[in-house]
Amino acid sequence: MTLKQVAFALALLCFSAGSAGAHERAIAAMGGPGRLAEPFAYTITNIGTLPGYTSSDALGIDNRGDVVGDVGGGNPFANPPSLADEAVVFGRGVLTGLGPVATGLPGPYASYAYAINNAGNVVGTIIDLNQSSGCDESSGAVAFAGPGLGGLGGTCPHGAAYGVNARGDAVGSESSSLAPFFSDAVLFHAGRAIVLGANAAASGINDSGIAVGQSAGCYGCTSVAAIFALHSRPTQIGTLGGPSSYGAAINNSGVAVGASDISKMGSYQHAFIYLRGKMFDLGVPAGFDPSTTSSYAVAINAHNEVVGSYLPSGGDQAAFVYANGAMRDLTSLIPPRSGWTLTAAAAINDRGEIVGTGSYRGQTLGFLLHPVRTAAGLSR
């Protein structure tokens, strides 16, 4: 996720499910995305990995095209040691490890960078893999670049920051107990952790400070996608007909995306877009049965372009982009014979650049997609 103004937050209080086609007209009225070019819409850059690691993930991107994520497969017990997984930043063609930061935890560590803003502030989490203290892999939200985040404290903390806005405010989840499922949605502001909601988690935040995530309302209750604002109670925004949902990201127009169960059984989920107080089902790519295929939206940009992944019953997970009223498989939009199969899209910036994870010649690696043309046939 993702994971706005108070006036818009009030408009989100009224939930109703939208009809097919209505969301396309609503998005168009707000200035929808340009048409994707053919025969392919994107060129692809391999993020690569670092020495001592075997894989990578690209998880966030800013409007300059700088990418954050992690490299994996390291061995903290090797000589010399590496992190089990290490947060990284990719910029100007160079992949750089962000390493651990001072935590006071004994280690060894794994670190992950989830989001970056246009000022270069990077947020994520660090996990202490040493369980000798009696804690089950304690973790904490962290800023790899930018002001420190703070936290709720506690004996065995569990936490992460998943989104950051232009002001450097971050959101995520924190638990201060031995049971990490007792978590709170948290705003990290000016070095303090401020609880936005109990039994909840926040995934994304926009520049007005409105956050999105999920809220159960009580321990043991079913989690439902929710909007969070400082000094306000979380507002659950409903589902697509099933018991649960989650919000992943929200843009500066207050348009949110996520995924929801589509039936009472909860066997399959569909990506949704939430705007003007209504939740709309984004469906699945053409050619797949919507009753047995799941889709998950995780990011949205200023042009209401949406990315995520989908999973057919009995099939393999694949990355998608939603634009022009249709969900498209991303692998079909890159040059043929590239060697890539794109399995998950994680973020999209306002230039339409997309990052995620795929398989390249049998290796799991992060990717960066660059749009070829807009509707006018010009480079972005």
Image (cartoon, helix red, strand yellow):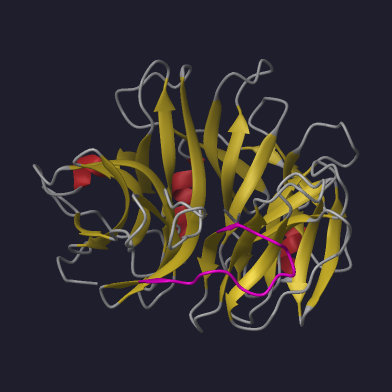
Q: For residue 100: magenta?
A: yes
Q: Position of residue 178 (x, y in %)?
A: 86, 45
Q: Position of residue 172 (x, y in %)?
A: 70, 59
Q: Is residue 244 visible?
A: yes
Apparent side of residue 219 relative to residue 138 in the rendered image (left or right): right
| Quadrant of residue 255 within the rendered picture | bottom right
Q: Nearer the viewer, residue 376 or 150?
A: 150
Apparent side of residue 21 relative to residue 212 in the rendered image (left or right): left
The C terminus appears in which quarter of the rendering? bottom left
Apparent side of residue 86 relative to residue 55 in the rendered image (left or right): right
Q: Position of residue 220 (x, y in %)?
A: 87, 31
In the picture as drawn, the residue positioned furthest to the front comes out as 79
Magenta stretch: give its range.
Answer: 96-110
Q: Nearer the viewer, residue 355 or 85?
A: 85
Q: Residue drawn at (42%, 39%), measured in percent from left and top? A: 309
Q: Position of residue 130 (x, y in %)?
A: 69, 51
Q: Residue drawn at (51%, 84%), measured in percent from left and top? A: 119
- Say above or below: 233 vs 289: below
Q: Nearer the viewer, residue 367 or 22?
A: 367
Q: Is residue 4 visible?
A: no
Q: Residue drawn at (64%, 21%), measured in percent from left and top? A: 266
What secondary structure prevails in the magenta region?
A: loop
Apparent side of residue 3 relative to residue 150 in the rendered image (left or right): left
